[in-house]
Image (tube, rainbow, N blue to C red):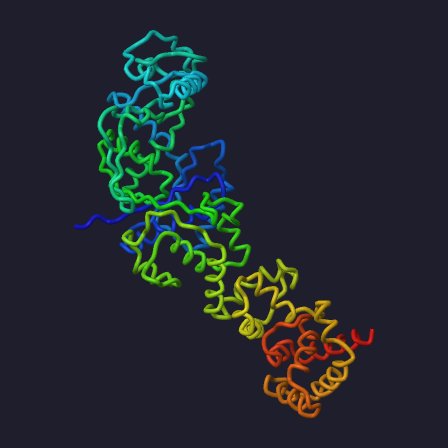
Amino acid sequence: MTEKIRVRFAPSPTGHLHIGGARTALFNWLFAHHNNGSFILRIEDTDRSRSTDEYIDAIIEGMKWLGLDWDEGPFRQTDRFDVYRNYIDRLVREGRAYHCYCSAEELEERRKLAIATGKQPKYDGRCRNIKRVQVDTTRFRGVEESRIQGSWVQGQGGNAAVRFKMPQEGETVVEDLIRGKVVFENNQLDDLIIMRSDRTPTYNFTVVVDDVDMKITHVIRGDDHLNNTPKQIHIYKALGYEIPKFAHLPMILGSDKARLSKRHGATSVMAYKEMGYLPDALVNYLVRLGWSYGDQEVFSREELTRHFSFDNVGKAAAVFNPEKLLWLNSQYIIHSSSEQLAELITPFLVGEKIINEGRVIDKEWLCKAIDTLKERSKTLVELAHSLRYYIVDEVEYNEQAKSKFLNEKSRGLLTELKSSLESAIEFSHQEIEGIFKAIVEKRGIKLKDLAQPVRVAMTGGTESPGIFEVLEIVGKEKTIKRLETAIRAINV
């Protein structure tokens, strides 16, 4: 029987869900769904000084917006401290870990000395093989003597940290699903701290225990974690558990090939929501940062799930291209139904102060308006801006457009059009078009000679969908009022 695949996304809640983390979550989600496996969400919040409930909520909000649902969780590491301590106690008893009382000041002094003398700045192992020293146990806040036996007490005292005994010879091989075989020399590995002196466990230990207890089969994460992998492999071995398969995703870089940061644009997932991006567009773009399937650019979720595999994930770092993301978002807007867009657009209409919060717009009318604009809009913010002249009572004129088209030459045309439209019965696209053509033929002018002044009168600018559509959607009452306002503006 084939083992059921189980993967996890394990963010640290020290900030919002960012682009790199979202891509890691997405690749885990796709791998699980492609293989009918399970996707677990785990919050790694052992860094108490930086982890906050606010950031946990923000990460969950970002995951939900992207549609990356999870099968189990969210679990929090801070709920599992007793579990980690039991494992650590076991390793100490078995001689695979040891207590270390070196102070932070001493460790920093030794690090500087190692660098100054050209040595690797790693722990020198002085507490590693000490069998027993006499210590004043009253200094260690209730830690029984058996727990501190074999430790060297130095510096200011306090509870001991616990270090894991790394092998000092040979090599560790990581068989990575993306990078292939990666070899690490064991003499370069540090005896890492697995529990701090305040009795809180550290990342490299808790991640192994969690992956063991949650039966994780594949660890999929950014390649900035690759150097942690040999350390974690030895912890798996010390605990006697099977080592999962690893896949380390390439980094995401900015256009200047430096690591992606705020100077390259927004890095928070929810910032893209606020800028009017669609979640499916961002998902589509993120998966293409390192993964490909032929020359195809636009994928549905079903297609991504069906085609995803690590065979098509590249080793090279991916470059984040905001222009390409914007283009992709425009494609998703174009191919979204106007009904879908109508559901999404209201917060942006409120945000752009086009409507007041709580105002309800007729959905059928709104869909007709969106139909005329979605091919011109790259984001929901742009779409909201474009809807302004359909919704507001009065438009603001672009001064250059007003000067060019609202003048003595167009006043008579606008006056005649207003009079003719007042007699319109259905005020439909077809009826409006007929009125325009009658005036054009009567005056012996081109359609644009009438259409452009009307466009400025109706929208404030020189670009819009077809003028007949614009008038039909704005409606007879507002159209007449705007033409009257434009005629008055010419007279001023």
Relative to 487, say whether 228 is above or below.
above
Q: Residue at x 32, y 59 (%)?
A: 293
Q: Would residue 465 be found to the left or right of residue 113 on screen?
A: right
Residue nearer the viewer, 327 or 370: 327
> Where does residue 490 sit, x and y in percent of width and height?
79, 75
> Where does residue 34 sit, x and y in percent of width and height?
29, 56
Relative to 295, say whether 311 is above or below.
above
| Number of marks present in the image shown | 0
> Where does residue 447 sit, x and y in percent of width and height?
64, 84
Q: Is residue 396 visible?
A: no
> Where does residue 298 sit, x and y in percent of width and height?
39, 63
Q: Would residue 382 be found to the left or right of residue 121 on screen?
A: right
Q: Residue at x 28, y 31 (%)?
A: 235
Q: Residue at x 47, y 58 (%)?
A: 325
Q: Is residue 479 visible?
A: yes
Q: Residue furthest left?
A: 1
Residue 304: quarter of image: bottom left
Residue 86: quarter of image: top left
The C terminus, quarter of image: bottom right
Q: Residue furthest top?
A: 134
Q: Would residue 433 be found to the left or right of residue 151 on screen?
A: right
Relative to 308, say whether 214 is above or below.
above
Relative to 148, say whether 234 is above or below.
below
Residue nearer the viewer, 41 or 489: 489
Q: Residue furthest bottom?
A: 442
